[in-house]
Amino acid sequence: MKVFENFFTNIQLPKCKGNGLKVNQRQRKIVGLLSWLKTTNLNDAISTVLCNLKKKKRDYAKSVIEHAVDSYKVPKCNLTFILDDRLADLKSELKLNSKLTRPCGEVLPASFIIRFLCGCYPSFFLNAISLHRTFLPSQVENVNLDSSFACSLYIRQVLYGILLRHDVPSSECENKECLSCVEEYDRRNGSLQKESVEPIFTLRSGTVLPNLYTLKDLSKVQSEKILSEVLGNEVGIFSSVPSEWQLLLGCIKYWLKNSNPGPKEEFIYALAISMLYFSFLTKFSCNDNKNDFDAKQEESDFSSISSTVKLVSDSEIDTAKRNIKKYLQKPVFNNGNPIILHIVHSFSQLQT
């Protein structure tokens, strides 16, 4: 922004080249700003920034900054409960004196706060709840195409709906501040831009989504039904697949239907090999006294993939491992062997 050009002339920016790297002006400003923040306190930093704005905008800008800072504060947070593995005591403390609330003042459930403090949930959950703002992480992708995060937009809308729904609906809670759109910052047309994303509270079938209080009370059947509907899968479609693969296959099916441009046939083979290598070859190592695969094959009806997997002997697993390591080496990218952007972009969509 031009209004801050004078501000950046008063802080030290790194050189355009250093340690063999070339940085543009925007990157220099980011590094310089972070270095400056390390040497100043919060109040002085806010005052310096506000001086560069017109007087009529300073009060509003100050309130936005202070609200953002306060949303990340957890006063008197005693980490000894977590470090000493006394989560039951922490739950009691949070019920009496929780500091994590929604903008309307509703206290977030203790179970959510505990898992958040333990690092089980990503930071963007709290960003969406408190700030209604999130920065989608950068990915390697084709900048001439739509952002790779467009593929998973519907999933994020459902997540926002679960995060923003209140425990007890009321006119005070269901205000624009609490249930408003989430501002997503993502790449659009080669630059970082803001887009308002509406949360979804009811699925297309009419199923009302749970909130953070009722989520833990859902049965396995209810959870699977909601998850299957969000991913566009039939309930039980992957019942014959090992449990640790079911969510992954559901996401792959969603990716195949929603990615643009769609993946090619070779991508599916690559995913199958990766799944075998990371989930199968390194895990299914069993007893030494197994019979050969061919002998067990005659005794099995192959009713499911799970039963088939258990028939593989250790010697066959070792052989497959050696072949994969020999023929599927990690590629080295350089000028002679550049990254193929359409392949990377397609898998970036799956990653979202």
Image (cartoon, rainbow, N blue to C red):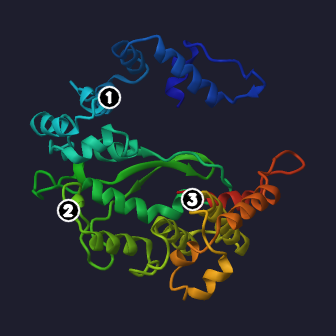
Instruction: Check disc 1 and report the residue beneath it.
Output: 69
Residue 145 in view in this figure: no
Residue 176 spot, x, y in % from top left = 22, 52
Residue 73 spot, x, y in % from top left = 28, 29
Point out the frontmost of discs 2 and 1.
2
Distance between the alpha carbons at the discs numbered 2 and 1: 33 Å
Disc 1 crowd rating (10 Å Cα; few below 14, some 14-19, many 20+) is: few
Amino acid marked by disc 3: Lys
Instruction: Check disc 2 and report the residue beneath it.
Output: 217
Q: To which quarter of the image does residue 87 belong?
A: top left
Residue plotted at (34% across, 29% down)? 65
Disc 2 crowd rating (10 Å Cα; few below 14, some 14-19, many 20+) is: few
Residue plotted at (31% across, 29% down)? 83
Instruction: Check disc 3 and report the residue beneath it.
Output: 283
Amino acid marked by disc 2: Asp
SS category of the residue bearing label 1: helix
Earlier in the chain: of badge 2 and badge 3, it is 2
SS category of the residue bearing label 3: loop
Residue 102 in view in this figure: yes
Earlier in the chain: of badge 2 and badge 1, it is 1
Q: Give the answer, above or below, for where 72 lies relative to 256.
A: above
Distance between the alpha carbons at the discs numbered 2 and 3: 32 Å
